[in-house]
Image (spheres, helix red, strand yellow):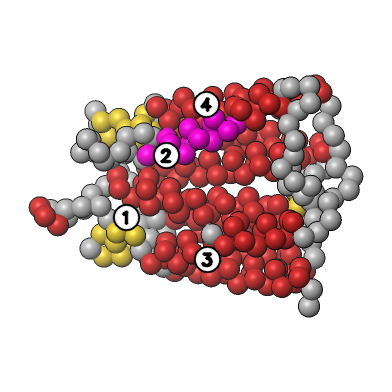
Amino acid sequence: MNHHKLLSYAHLILAGGYLVFALVGSWAKRGSSYGAFSSDGGTGFGIIGVVLGVILFLCAIFRIIGRAQVLPGLGVEQLTIIIGVAAWLNLICFIVGWLPIFEYGEGRRRGVPGTGWGVVGGYFTVSQIPLLLSPLTLGIPSPSKGIKALSDKNRQLFSIGTIASGIGFIVFPFMAWVESGSIQLSAFDGRSGNPTSGPRFGYLLLILGVILVLAGLMRLRPKGLAEPGPNMLLSHCLLTIGVLSITMPLGIIISCLQRSGLDIGVGTWLTLASSLLVIGLALSENKSRDAVGV
């Protein structure tokens, strides 16, 4: 059995383990335990986590049967690392962002809900896919051949779109993300000094926004920006940021729709639009370059 088969079966085991933890395990403890689809449990982030788990499991099957391409310009191994990063950080966003918004209990027993065993188990299984398996898979083979270079005009257009999306990631988290009556919570509102906690996704979005702006500006140079690797191009990194970032507003939107008394703020919708722009730019560049690695 060669290294590709070994890594493929390891991927299948880890993806299957994550999917079981996400689907069957508890996501939140509020006196009782609540699962992925409960409005008191995983809610929007649980639903997204299960969907990402299904995609990771299907990618593992594709790798075992030898399928190389999922979409034009996007290979199975590349999609695996993209979805793996998104699934991993979706759990972190749920723990530090959504879970602390609603306290439960009364008096001394009042506090932030606990994390369920499904989230803990899912974290340790899915984190190994982008941290260990996918880098090995992308790093062992020889570089892909036939990847086309971008024309200067297209490179400038993609760069300007990247910068615009990055500015959105920096600005929109300061706007209202969750509303309830007269209360408006931005993505930077936390529990410190504020009895009502906000989603607290703003710090991660701010980092992603700065990365996008810097990358876009550097790609505008005549020499452009060097690719991260022969089998992982800048467009794949853009797609990773796009898929990761969209889990935050999408999780908030689904969660607010599940719970009564909550409204979706304008910052959430605008961040969703920025994420869709990044994903569209990345998919368009992948297709134009035929950028299938491995």
For the residue carrying disc 3, how many other residues have a C-alpha within 10 Å: few (<14), some (14-19), or many (20+)? many
For the residue carrying disc 1, how many other residues have a C-alpha within 10 Å: few (<14), some (14-19), or many (20+)? many
| Distance (Cα) linking label 4 and label 3 | 32 Å
Q: What is the chief secondary structure element of the magenta stretch? A: helix
Q: Which residue is mark 4?
A: 168
| Label located before the other in sequence (1 or 3) | 1
| Label located before the other in sequence (4 or 3) | 3
For the residue carrying disc 4, how many other residues have a C-alpha within 10 Å: few (<14), some (14-19), or many (20+)? many
Q: Which residue is mark 3?
A: 125
Nearer to us in this view, 158 or 140? 140
Residue type at mark 4?
Answer: Gly
Q: How many numbered discs?
A: 4
The answer to whether residue 141 of the structure is visible from this angle is yes
Q: Which residue is mark 1?
A: 40
- x then y, percent, for residue 189: 32, 34
In the image, 165: left or right of 43? right
Nearer to us in this view, 196 or 138? 138
Per the image, label 2 sits on a secondary structure element best described as loop
Looking at the rendered image, the quarter that the C terminus falls into is bottom right
Q: Residue 201: say if magenta.
A: yes
Q: Which residue is mark 2?
A: 201
Q: Residue furthest bottom?
A: 1
- x then y, percent, for residue 132: 62, 61
